[in-house]
Amino acid sequence: MNMTVVGIGIGAFVAFMSFQFGLWGFLVSLLFMGVGALLGRAADGKLDLRSVLDAITGRRSSS
């Protein structure tokens, strides 16, 4: 099991807990699952969070 799957699993757990709060809880749970997947990919070494942050803030472009 790789860290991406672990991250998605953690996000799914948070999603289950958030789902009790209705539609907004469901939308927040989708956000948490995405963050969990990103953190899992970063832990695997398949995603460089510094590059993502630089691209979001406009310091670098991907092209």
Image: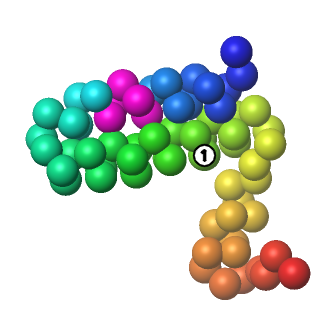
SS class of the residue under badge 1? Answer: helix
Relative horizontal placement of residue 59, taking residue 39 as reference (left or right): right
Q: Residue 26 appears at what percent x and percent y?
A: 26, 45
Q: Quadrant of residue 15?
A: top left
- The colour scheme applied to this rendered structure is rainbow
Residue drawn at the location 41% of the way across and 29% of the way down: 12
Residue at mark 1:
38
Quarter of the figure that contains the C terminus: bottom right
Outermost residue on the right side: it is: 63
Residue drawn at the location 33% of the way across and 43% of the way down: 29
Q: Is residue 57 above or below residue 14?
A: below
User: Magenta residues, as a range?
Assistant: 11-15
Question: Which amino acid, by three-letter code, is at mark 1?
Answer: Leu
User: In front here: 25 or 54?
Assistant: 25
Residue drawn at the location 76% of the way across and 53% of the way down: 48
Q: Residue 30 appears at what percent x and percent y?
A: 39, 47
Q: Is residue 34 above or below residue 8?
A: below
Classified by dominant secondary structure, the portion drawn in magenta counts as helix
Q: Is residue 54 above or below residue 35?
A: below
Q: Is residue 15 above or below residue 25?
A: above
Q: Residue 53 appears at what percent x and percent y?
A: 64, 67
Residue drawn at the location 79% of the way across and 81% of the way down: 61
Relative horizontal placement of residue 52, taking residue 16 as reference (left or right): right
Relative horizontal placement of residue 53, taking residue 32 as reference (left or right): right
- Tag 1: Cα neighbours inside 10 Å, few (<14), some, or many (≥20)? many
Outermost residue on the front side: it is: 23
Q: Residue 44 appears at what percent x and percent y?
A: 75, 33
Outermost residue on the top side: it is: 1
Relative horizontal placement of residue 27, taking residue 5 as reference (left or right): left
Question: Magenta stretch: residue 19 in it?
Answer: no
Quarter of the figure that contains the N terminus: top right
Question: Magenta stretch: residue 12 in it?
Answer: yes
